[in-house]
């Protein structure tokens, strides 16, 4: 069963997003004390923690950049849904709101588009 966006903490959303982008947690198994992560690149240096996708447009741009051509359209549809309450209802007004969607809104749309939350 997919978790609901409203039931997930920011940290849980960050981790789901990171894993969807190919990040892997250190294999030592000590998830309580160890927060070392390895990026998808072969030569990636380990980092502490995952990116702050919900606060960083740069991090979200990286995540959205992993989407294929079909998933990009699904992401766009999901972003419209996430922003729905703010859309004024005219084409340019709606476009302005969507272009300016926050990192947090983009993260929610990403998780919806990837089918990782509902
Ligand atoms: Zn470890």
Image (tube, rainbow, N blue to C red):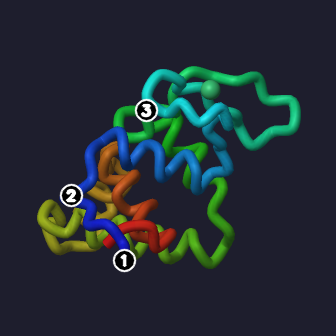
Q: Residue 35 appears at what percent x and percent y? A: 52, 26
- Taking the image as shown, residue 57 lies to the left or right of residue 30, namely left
Q: Residues within 10 Å of mark 1 (few under 14, many from 20)?
A: few
Closer to the N terminus: mark 1 or mark 3? 1
Percent position of residue 79, x then y: 35, 65
Kindly indicate the quadrant of the structure image that contains residue 55. Answer: top left
Q: In the displayed structure, does residue 74 sit left or right of residue 55?
A: right
Q: Residue at x 20, y 73 (%)?
A: 90
75 left or right of 7?
right
**For the point 70% across and 24% down, which residue is it?**
46
- Cα–Cα span, label 1 and label 2: 13 Å
C-alpha gap between disc 1 and disc 3:
25 Å
Residue mark closest to the camera, 1 vs 3: 1
Quarter, ligand 1: top right
Residue 45: assigned label: none
- Mark with earlier residue (2, 3): 2
For the residue pair 3 and 110, the one nearer the viewer reads as 3
Sequence order check, earlier mark of 1 and 2: 1
Label 2 secondary element: helix
- Please report the residue visible at 56 percent of the width from the left and 69 percent of the height from the top: 72
Q: Which residue is mark 3?
A: 52
Residue 70 drawn above or below residue 28 = below
Q: Mark 2 against mark 3, which lies toward the viewer?
A: 2
Look at the picture and state if 11 lies above or below 45: below
- Which mark is drawn over residue 7? 2
In this rendering, would 95 be left or right of 42? Answer: left
Q: Which mark is residue 1?
A: 1
SS class, disc 3 = loop
Crowd rating for badge 2 (residues with CA inside 10 Å; few <14, some 14–19, many 20+): few
């Amino acid at each position: 069963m997919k978790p609901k966006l409203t039931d997930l903490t920011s940290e849980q959303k960050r981790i789901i997003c990171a894993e969807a982008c190919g990040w892997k947690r250190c294999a030592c198994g000590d998830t309580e004390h160890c927060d070392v992560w390895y990026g998808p690149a072969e030569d990636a240096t380990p980092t502490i923690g995952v990116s702050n996708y919900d606060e960083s447009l740069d991090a979200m741009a990286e995540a959205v950049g992993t989407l294929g051509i079909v998933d990009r359209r699904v992401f766009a549809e999901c972003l419209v849904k996430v922003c729905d309450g703010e859309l004024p209802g005219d084409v340019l007004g709606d476009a302005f709101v969507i272009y300016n969607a926050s990192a947090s809104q983009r993260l929610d749309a990403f998780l919806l588009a990837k089918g990782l939350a509902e």
